[in-house]
Amino acid sequence: MPGDEIPVTVLSGSLGAGKTTLLNHLLEGAGDRRIAVLVNDMGEVNVDAELVSGTSKGLAGDVTELSNGCICCELRGDLERAVMRLARERDFDHLVVEASGISEPAPVAKLFTRGKASARYVVDSIVTVVDARQFHDAFGGTGVVERRGAAEDDTRPLSDLLVEQVELANLVVVNKADLVSDAELATVEELVAGLRPDAEIVTTEYSSVDPDVLFGRRLYDPATAAEAAGWRRALSEDEVGDGHDHDDHDDHHHDGHRHPDEVYGVTSFVFRSRRPFDPSCIADVLADLPESVVRSKGTLWVAGSEQHLTLGQAGPSVHVEAAGPWVATLPAFEQDAYHRNRRQVAWDDTWGDRRTELVFIGTGIDEAALRGRLDDCLLDEEAFADFEPGAWEGGDDRIPTEQGERVVVATP
């Protein structure tokens, strides 16, 4: 019956950040709560489950292992079966799902908002544990960030995962605060707030967090979860806050909205254009972004590719992916269907949906310099006057041209 759903906390964070230590603190301080735990590890032996089980004897916790895989992908079926079994037994008050260090929390949360599990569970919050030293070295300083444990064989850049785990969190536990200076800790907290503005931040040592801070908060809202990341907010605030008509196709706009330093300590700006980039020039810029840029995301219009290109950057990791053809390249009946379903879409009479919309987030970004470099990569007036989509000669291997193609432009 409605209101009787089991609350779920999804616990994420990089390997070694302190998730399992936090989980043990929660079990030890559970009080009258009965907590069931699903623990996932990438190794054949589920070390985390052994650590939790070994310290929770006699407590109310029910620890279930999912070994040798990642719950957000190949073990998804196992996870669903496990949570439904637990729901049928229902001998607990709260479920904690500890994802592996290389798992994204969003797919795990979706399991409980869709399908069978959604009738029995409700996501209470997504909690991400951040290793303050590791995070500062990755994004706030000049240190060298290294992978730990089983994640060493993962080919995905660690910086991507660290950022996305924060962007998806309702509550971020900044752990190991004793391993950084006060100034470094402030930088980490500011970066976290810039990446996920509405997330609560708890600073701690040894993952010592009161269970009341994490449980029963109802911080997760599936309707707005995907829009809460800092880069998405920057885009939406720029659209309503800068006073420009972004459908104007006579020129490109780059009067972006800057988040105030006094609020987050992190600045962001939006770059928009209705002119395409020269492929080699923009690839050079993306391969050499300033270290001050922690995160950039958005849409790229690049001459020589009729694909809607998406940029993803986190620290030193940069990639460009071809998401699919621009709607303007599709047959008329498909364009009509698109417009019926998306009446608010920014559409240009000449270029359709072709456009660039990029968000840059970081600390101490020289906005004018970066804007200048981006402006210099746009086709000049003469070249743009003669521009014909699909007829551009001269591409660049770093710019994908086929749907689904993903090119790594820069890597740590």
Image: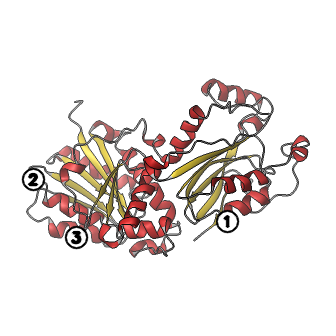
Residue 311: % across, % down: 63, 53
Image point 43% across, 61% down: which residue?
187
Q: Which mark is residue 288?
A: 1
The reply to whether discs 3 and 2 touch (Cβ–Cβ < 8 Å) is no
Residue 357 lies left or right of residue 351; in this view the side is left
Q: Which residue is mark 3?
A: 51
- Identify the element where label 1 is drawn: loop
Residue 367's disc number: none
Q: Mark 3, residues whose alpha carbon is within 10 Å: few (<14), some, or many (≥20)? A: some
Counting residues from the N terminus, which is met first, the one under dot 3 or under dot 2? Answer: 2
Position of residue 146 measured from the top left corner of the image (x, y, whole percent): 46, 75
Picture coordinates of residue 308, whole percent (x, y): 69, 45
Between circles 1 and 2, the one closer to the viewer is: 1
From where the camera sits, is residue 196 visible? Answer: no
The residue tagged 2 is 31
Query: The residue under label 2 is which amino acid type?
Result: Gly
Q: Residue furthest front?
A: 262
- Crowding around mark 1 (Cα neighbors within 10 Å: few <14, some 14 to 19, many 20+) is few
Instruction: Give the secondary structure at mark 3.
Output: helix
Q: Quadrant of residue 135?
A: bottom left
The answer to which of marks 1 and 3 sits earlier in the sequence is: 3
